[in-house]
Image (spheres, rainbow, N blue to C red):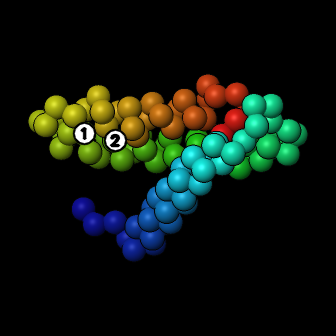
Amino acid sequence: MCLPKRIMRNMALVLVVVLLVSVGGSAIAKTAANDPDAGAMVADTLIARPLGLASLVFGSAIFVVALPFSAPSGTVSMAAKKMIVNPAMFTFTRPLGKM
C-alpha cells in the first residue's frame, strides 16, 4: 500500500513541527519562572496544547503502525510511553502555562 505524495509530505511536516516543539519546549522549561504569567498561559492554550494533542494523535497512529515491530522485540511498553503516554501527559495533566 503506497500513500500519495501529498499525504506523506503532510505527515513529514507534522513530524517536523512536533519535533521542533518538543525540543524547543525543553529549553523554555528551564528558563520559565515558577509562576507563569498570562502570556505564557495564552501561548500554552493556543499553541502548545493543540500541538500536544496533534502529537498525541500522530504518535498513536505511529504506535499502531510500529506495533508489529515492537511486539516481537518486547518494547511495546517503551514505545507506548514515548508515543502515547508522554504526549498525553504533556497535553492534559501539566499545569497551564508550565512548559
What type is the residue that disc 1 sits on? Answer: Leu
Q: Residue 62: horizontal and vertical position, in percent?
A: 36, 47
Q: Residues within 10 Å of mark 1 (few under 14, many from 20)?
A: some
Camera-side residue: 77 or 62? 77
Q: Is residue 27 left or right of residue 5?
A: right
Q: Residues within 10 Å of mark 2 (few under 14, many from 20)?
A: many
Q: Which residue is mark 1?
A: 67
Q: Is residue 71 left or right of residue 54?
A: left
- Residue at image point 38% right, 70% down: 4
- Residue at image point 71% right, 49% down: 47
Q: Residue 29: horizontal and vertical position, in percent?
A: 64, 42
Q: Secondary structure at mark 1?
A: helix
Q: Residue furthest right?
A: 38
Q: Is residue 39 above or below residue 12?
A: above
- Residue at image point 54% right, 29% down: 89
Disc 2 to disc 1: CB gap under 8 Å: yes
Q: Quadrant of the C terminus?
A: top right
What type is the residue that disc 2 sits on? Answer: Phe
Q: Which residue is mark 2?
A: 63
Task: Measure how far apart labels 2 and 1 are at the Cα level.
Answer: 6 Å
Q: Secondary structure at mark 2?
A: helix
